[in-house]
Amino acid sequence: MKKLSLPMQILIALIGGIIAGLICFFAGVPEFTTNYLKPFGTIFVNLLKFIVVPVVLLSMIDGILSMDDMKKVGSVGWKTVAYFMATTAAAGVIGLVIANLFDAAGLFPTLALEAGQEWTKPTSANFMDTLVGMFPSNMWEAFHTSNMLQVIVIAVMLGGSIMAAGEKGKVARDVVASFNEVINQLMSFIISLSPIGVFTMMAWVVATQGAAILGSLAIVVGCAYLAYFVHSVIVYSFSAKVFCGISPLAFFKGAAAAMMFAFTSTSSAATLPVSKECAEELGSTKEIAAFVLPLGATIHMDGTAIYQCVATVFLASCAGVDLGIGQMVTIIVTATLASIGTAGVSGAGMIMLAMVLTAMGIDVNMIMIIYGVDRLFDMGRTCLNVTGDIAGAVCVTKWEEKKAAKTK
């Protein structure tokens, strides 16, 4: 028989875990899942924690180094990155606003705690404390404590320094590329264990919380898709209209082929050929599309930013953690900066979510509550990512045309 794909394995594990959990719940023996199934899920979560820091550090440095061609393309490079970072920050804000509206309406649950268990609630920090806390005084301490904002800053500084070193930094560049590939292979192995983690943790969650948690999962997926829709309409179609004179209907009609391909394939890289055709039909030049779209597939992750924000608010609600303004700012900053290191690795969205939860002081074990439905999130966020790349290519082309017209 043809080997089942990983998404299909995860789906089967999800269904099996739900059935096993319901059996234990109605049989009145939820402690069976706690004592004999959850430990295997905990092992999987520990492996996720183990891989977070090296994945973020190396993939971000590698992503920064991949932008080396910006020196050659000049203004196209900085305009592209500025557009990407601005839309990703907007995605984070939209995701947080909609998720908090759902939470305020009581649509997100607070899970019952086991005897003797309590969640550690983070204290709210103001913006200046968050800003100061981003910069490490000890690199190894940042790694040891998994301070992800500091790890991101370290990656940005090291990546920029290697790039600035030029030819003398070639060895460091090669070392980063080599280690990044090794870590990616290791992470692929860990992600391949997902079905075990999904089955054991889903069985535990359903057995201890009952069938009501299933409705909550449908609600959080709906919340994410609402944020995806709002972001695409407000940010992408608005920018296409304002900067390029393209109506929202014409923009989405022109990008539809790439959007559908991305939704079904869940791969920005695999969608690139279709994305290039759509971008050129909407007015992008071949040269700019050839630069912006591959770069976008590497560092532009608006869908992932929304996913991280929605999932974090949902899981914080499950844990009974009230997120303050300081935590909200941290989530947006982390999601925006982490977009550089999210691409090119299967399952990276879940790794980035583990990073955000760590920064929030929320138990990373909570991640398994939504891991089983991650494929549903992934379809929408990949579609949104590709749509944003096309909008970026069209906008940058128009800006370059206006610049060329002024210099004539």
Image: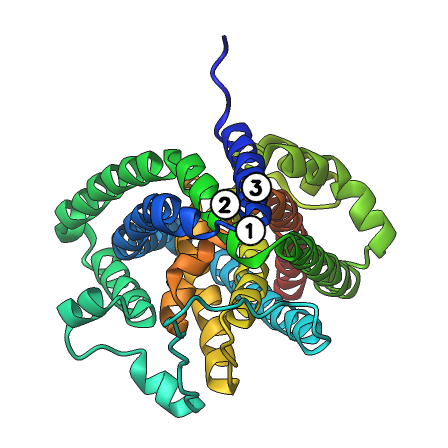
Task: State the residue in front, 139 or 309.
Answer: 309
Q: Give, as a three-letter code, the residue at label 2.
A: Ala
- Report crowding for label 3: few under 14, some 14 to 19, many 20 or more residues within 10 A (C-alpha): some
Residue at the location (13% across, 52% down)?
Answer: 168
Q: Distance between the Cα atoms at labels 2 and 1?
A: 5 Å
For disc 3, the marked residue is: 23
In which quadrant of the rendered view does residue 182 lie?
Answer: top left
Residue 365 pos. (x, y %): 39, 58
What whole-number distance in Å separates the C-alpha atoms at marks 2 and 3?
9 Å
Comes first in the chain, label 2 or label 3: 3
Report the front residue among 266 and 9.
9
Q: Verify CB contact (< 8 Å) between mark 2 and mark 1.
A: yes
**Splitting the image into 4 quarters, where does residue 261 fall?**
top right
Tell me if label 1 and label 3 are in contact, CB under 8 Å.
no
Q: In the image, which disc is placed on residue 222? A: none
Q: Nearer the viewer, mark 2 or mark 3?
A: 3
Q: Which residue is mark 1?
A: 206
The answer to whether residue 375 of the structure is visible from this angle is: yes
Where residue 229 appears, x then y in whole percent? 74, 57
Residue labelled with disc 2: 203
Q: Is residue 73 visible?
A: no
Q: Which amino acid, mark 3? A: Ile
Residue 58 in the image, given as x and y percentages of width and height: 27, 51
| Distance from the alpha carbon under mark 1 to that under mark 3 | 9 Å
Q: Secondary structure at mark 1?
A: helix
Q: Residue at x 29, y 35 (%)?
A: 185
Q: Residues within 10 Å of mark 1 (few under 14, many from 20)?
A: many
